Image: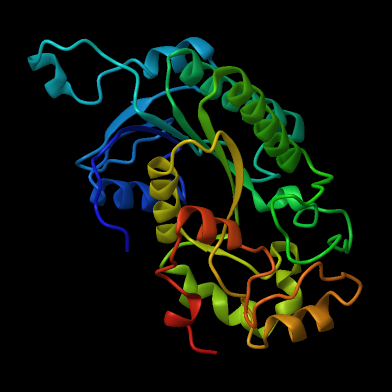
Amino acid sequence: MAAVTAGKRIIFTGGTGKAGRHAIPYLLNKGHKVMNLDLYPLNHPDVFDLKTDLTDSGQVFNAFTTDMNYAAYEGSSLPQPPDAVIHFAAWARNGLVPDNECFSANTKATYNVIEAACKLGVKKIIIASSETTYGVCFAQGDADYHSFPLEEDYDVDPMDSYALSKICGEKTARAFARRFGNDIYCLRIGNVIEPDEYARDFPAFVAKPETRKRNAWSYVDARDLGQICDLCVQKTGLGFQVFNATNDSITAKTNTADTLKRYAPNTPLTRKMGENEGPLSNRKIREVLGFQEQHDWKMYYKP
């Protein structure tokens, strides 16, 4: 695990959600100060919660210049923008609200967050994109991927409103990074797994690998996602980037080649893959950010 570095002041949106409630403690342990913008409180003793409607641009600008705790009133310094913004807040999938509201709220919130951060001079912005952009997770019917491994230069072509909102977020990030010259990293986050979900979900995942095609037989441990966020905060000067945010290995008993040959026989390989490499490959975060997974699924479930 990477050594603790000088802490940053981080605004984290959606920190009460499934990913955020594990990523934030990791960031705190690395010495960062975190404020959570969400409609519901995280209720962590070291995190200041600020109820914020991210689809309201005025609220976002104001929240980004709000003191991160009440102790700030005791000092002489006026509120300042954060050092970094991590934007995870969103409708997390299709089916929670009507499709048009999912698309509208997600794209508007992401635009507002990126615009406010850029115009306030924030040099590091990290946003949550999604595995769904690869076009199979919420596809109509039994769709095939174009090729394996799924890497960041893939021609993303989803059918659904949620994934489309995430592609719009990536394009928004690219536009603002080009204009403002700051770092905006987009994380195509895999199927997020919390610690208690290994025992509950992985027996079925492993027993019925055909059900994992929509997730490309890949996942990300919520705690390792915290590490990825920290590495993104630390790594500067890359401008606009897209990173797959997943753990290392395929979620199957058989190796990658055999699993893909059986359950995705029509999908070609563009390079030789590692013996147990996840088809939604994390090679870029390992090579560019130095990611080292701490929570391999086989540590928690033995098929």
Q: Quadrant of the N terminus?
A: bottom left
Q: Is residue 91 visible?
A: no
Q: Is residue 40 above or below residue 108?
A: below
Q: Residue 270 vs residue 66: left or right? A: right
Position of residue 106 relative to residue 25, above or below, is above
Residue at 39%, 12% in the rendered image: 62
In the image, what residue occupies the spot 75% across and 29% down? 100
Query: To which quarter of the image does residue 216 belong?
Result: bottom right
Horizontal and vertical percent position of residue 106: 63, 31
Image position, residue 146 (x, y; %):
86, 60
On the image, which quarter does residue 107 sit in?
top right
165 and 140: which is toward the camera: 165
The answer to whether residue 274 is above or below residue 281 is below
Residue 158 location, x and y as percent? 81, 46
Q: Residue 159 is drawn in which quadrant?
A: top right
* Residue drawn at 67 percent across, 53 percent down: 131
Quadrant for the C terminus, please: bottom right
**Count of all numbered marks drawn on residues in the image:** 0
Q: Specify the farthest residue to the left.
A: 74
Q: Position of residue 197 (x, y in %)?
A: 48, 69
Q: Is residue 213 left or right of residue 226?
A: right
- Residue 76 shows in this picture: yes
Q: Residue furthest front?
A: 237
How is the protein colored in the picture? rainbow
What residue lies at 43% left-to-right and 43% top-to-bottom?
235
Q: Is residue 265 left or right of residue 118?
A: right
